[in-house]
Image (cartoon, rainbow, N blue to C red):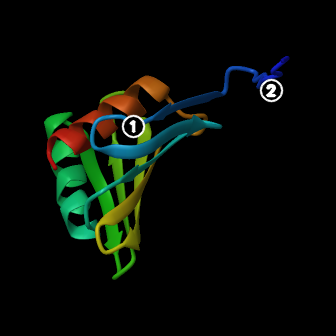
Amino acid sequence: MLVVAPVLVTSGCLAVAAGAAGAGTVAYIRGELDATVGYNLDAVDRAANQAGQQLQFAKINESADAFTRVITLRTAEDKKVEIKLRRSGDALTRVEIRVGLFGDEAISRALLEKIQANL
């Protein structure tokens, strides 16, 4: 019996890890880190603010409503960091992180790790 498995070819702009610590799924696509965490929006918001302080990013702006939070930070190199949090359920929050215009995967992943550590 011959089994054929599909092969996915990418240009290196896609990295996916499932089951990362504290996260259901994590994907880095087109300069943005996208993760889903099993915590409510308020808890993730607190953890994201703590992570920004721990990484010594300057907080520029924050906006919030019942379903979405947006935190804007700046690194020491003056790169804009935007964290978008979206309520996906009572205990499920989508986290989107973009660093600069084209993204920075290392900074994005470090920030997500800090967020998860604070949960």
Q: Secondary structure under badge 1?
A: loop
Q: Position of residue 4 (x, y in %)?
A: 83, 22
Residue 72, image x, y percentages: 37, 54
Number of marks present in the image shown = 2
**Horizontal side of residue 12 vs 75, given as left or right:** right
Based on the displayed image, in which of its 4 quarters is residue 10 positioned?
top right
- Is residue 95 positioned above or below 111 on the image? below
Task: Indicate which disc, 2 or 1, sits on the residue closer to the N terminus.
Answer: 2
Q: Amino acid at mark 1?
A: Gly
Q: Secondary structure at mark 2?
A: loop
On screen, residue 107 above or below 98 = above
What is the number of the mark on residue 71? none
Q: Which mark is residue 6?
A: 2
Res 20 quadrant in image: top left
Considering depth in this image, is 24 or 58 the residue closer to the camera? 24
Q: Which mark is residue 19?
A: 1
